[in-house]
């Protein structure tokens, strides 16, 4: 009786989720409904449109930009949070090579397209060769801050983020400052 009870208790202890740590993927692919599978069995035209880049090494990458709360109150905020996320939506790993430690660049522009603030002005970069590998369905996030001292209240501005080594990886977003 004891010989059969011990293996059963060990099996029960190992099978509970409380004893194991589950690793959740960063992004899960969206599942299609039964009706969409019947109407369009091969899934053509149902997925998210990926950007078309001239450089074939970049195909499958999606760039997104998230800013701090809107509208930005300049009386309370000296720096604005900017999160740049690069996601690999392809089925193969993508390698990016950099010649220095600078990965991204962020510009704050007015509506006349004049550059008011440059993120890299306040940072030092070393000349170090580096390679970044982004696996399928994974992402890299760059949370940064940029100074808001050149901004005035109740106006529209543009945040532009891009990778200097890969100028095709570029995204822009407008935001409003509070009165």
Image (cartoon, helix red, strand yellow):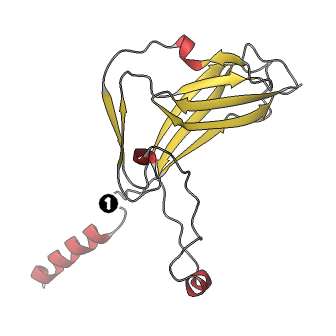
Q: Quadrant of the N terminus?
A: bottom left
Left or right: 23, with 1 as reference point = right
Left or right: 53, with 16 as reference point = right
Q: Position of residue 130 (x, y in %)?
A: 32, 29
Q: Residue furthest left?
A: 3
At 77% from the left edge and 20% from the top edge, which residue is drawn?
76
Q: Position of residue 71 (x, y in %)?
A: 80, 33
Q: Taking 114 as reference, is 37 above or below it?
A: below
At 75% from the left edge and 35% from the top edge, which residue is drawn?
174
Number of residue marks: 1
Residue 78 in sight from this viewpoint: no
Q: Taking 172 as reference, is 16 above or below it?
A: below
Q: Quadrant of the C terminus?
A: top right
Name the quadrant containing residue 70. Answer: top right
At 37% from the left edge and 62% from the top edge, which residue is drawn?
18
Q: Position of residue 35 (x, y in %)?
A: 61, 85
Tell which of 123 and 50 is nearer to you. Answer: 50
Circle 1 crowding by C-alpha within 10 Å: few under 14, some 14–19, many from 20: few
Residue 178 in sight from this viewpoint: yes
Q: Which secondary structure, mark 1?
A: loop
- Provide the residue designation for mark 1: 20
Q: Taking 133 as reference, is 9 above or below it?
A: below
Q: Taking 78 as reference, is 24 above or below it?
A: below
Q: Position of residue 106 (x, y in %)?
A: 59, 25
């Amino acid at each position: 009786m004891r010989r059969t009870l011990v293996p059963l208790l060990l099996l029960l202890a190992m099978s509970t989720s409380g004893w194991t740590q589950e690793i959740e993927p960063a992004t899960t692919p969206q599942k299609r409904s039964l009706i969409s599978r019947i109407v369009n069995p091969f899934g053509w035209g149902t997925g998210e449109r990926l950007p078309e880049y001239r450089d074939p090494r970049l195909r499958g990458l999606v760039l997104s930009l998230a800013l701090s709360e809107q509208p930005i109150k300049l009386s309370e905020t000296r720096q604005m949070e900017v999160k740049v996320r690069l996601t690999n939506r392809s089925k193969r790993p993508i390698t990016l090579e950099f010649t220095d430690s600078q990965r991204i660049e962020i510009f704050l522009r007015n509506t006349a397209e004049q550059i008011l603030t440059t993120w890299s002005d306040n940072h030092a970069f070393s000349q170090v060769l580096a390679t970044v590998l982004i696996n399928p369905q994974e992402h890299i996030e760059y949370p940064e801050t940029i100074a808001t001292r050149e901004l005035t209240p109740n106006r529209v501005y543009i945040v532009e983020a891009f990778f200097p080594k890969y100028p095709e990886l570029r995204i822009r977003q407008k935001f409003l400052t509070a009165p």
